[in-house]
Image (spheres, grey):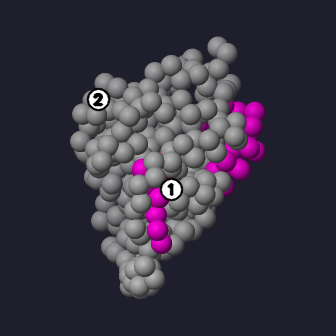
Amino acid sequence: MKALWVGLGLLAASCAHFNRAEPRTTAPVIEAAPAVPEETATFKVVTYNLHGEPAGPVARALSTTRAIRGADWVLLQEVEAHPDETAPRAVRIARLLGMGAVYAPGYGLGDGGSHGVALLSRYPLKEIRIIELPRKFVVINSARRVAIGATAMVGGLEIRIYSVHLDNRLNPAERREQLGPVIDDAKGYFKLPTIIAGDVNTSPFCWALHLLPLPCAIQDDRLESFVRRHGFDTPVVGSGPTSPFLDMRLDAIYTRGFEVYEYGVARRVKVSDHLPLWAQMRLAGR
């Protein structure tokens, strides 16, 4: 057994060169929505990990798939920017959908581009904040992780929104710690209805040395308990898988001050290795 752990340690050390570079710039790219829609009583939120896919197919899926088209906010993870393209892909998707966008680079790519998260909005945004998440050495693909927080202005109403992407090979306590800065930021907006959504990577595994998967099936329960302790609801726990691989539920939408009355997974969208998760909601008590 000791030899096994030593071998795994040596393997982990040898994998260090597979980790991700820093981005050339950490500055966000922000583009305002071209028009301000009328105030509404209900909202649709979509979160989607793009796995680095091009803007065109993603925008087509978001605009033509009944369950997810017309979203008020689209939260993207693993969305890229490349120097030979006219704008970050998140911005190009937003333009095709008639939305505004915030793109935040996470880590750098070999061509000088970047890979990060985005928040697309039909409504004007203010108090935009790029939140550095605790960096975890996960052996392969260790990288700088960020979340985006912004306040959407819906007529006279303000709504706080976060787009997040957590590391894959984390154990429950580390996953809670990595989400912690987002929860802390949201505490500063405790009077606002709030949405936290993204790829939280709650696979049914725990990890030995951040490398060897061990079935445990507690990742989602532990993270959901954590956000509930901090005043958030977990309204989409019955969504089913958001990844066709091993039918894993990797993505989540957490809310505060909302009543979610419909949600689901757009299972026919095959653009990425994830499936879009969506929720329709209204302000609580209205």
Give the image quarter of residue 13.
bottom left
Q: Where is residue 101 in the image (x, y as percent from the top left)?
A: 48, 45
Res. 101 visible in picture: no
Q: Does the magenta stretch include residue 23?
A: no
Q: In which quarter of the image is the N terminus?
A: bottom left
SS at mark 2 in the image: loop
- Count of marks placed on residues: 2
Residue 166, disc: 1
Res. 8 visible in picture: yes
Q: Do the residues labelled 1 and 2 touch (CB within 8 Å)?
A: no
What's under tag 1, amino acid-wise? Leu
In the image: residue 223, left or right of residue 246: right
Q: Position of residue 122 (x, y in %)?
A: 49, 33
Query: In the rendered image, which residue does mark 2 sit on?
Result: 65
Q: Is residue 200 magenta?
A: yes
Q: Where is residue 248 in the image (x, y as percent from the top left)?
A: 36, 45
Question: Residue at 40% of width from left, 62% of height from top?
Answer: 213
Residue 279, disc: none
What's under tag 2, amino acid-wise? Thr
Question: Residue at 24% of width from left, 42% of height from top?
Answer: 270
* Residue placed most toward the observer, 50 or 232: 232
Badge 2: how crowded within 10 Å, few (<14), some, or many (20+)?
A: few
Question: Residue at 70% of width from left, 49% of height from top?
Answer: 185
* Residue placed most toward the observer, 148 or 138: 138
Which stretch appears magenta? 181-209
63 up-or-down from 224: above or below: above
Q: Say whether disc 1 or disc 2 marks the residue closer to the N-terminus.
A: 2
Give the image quarter of residue 86.
bottom left
Query: Which residue is at the far top?
Result: 286
Q: How far apart are marks 1 and 2 (CA)?
A: 27 Å
217 up-or-down from 266: above or below: below
* Residue placed most toward the observer, 21 or 224: 224
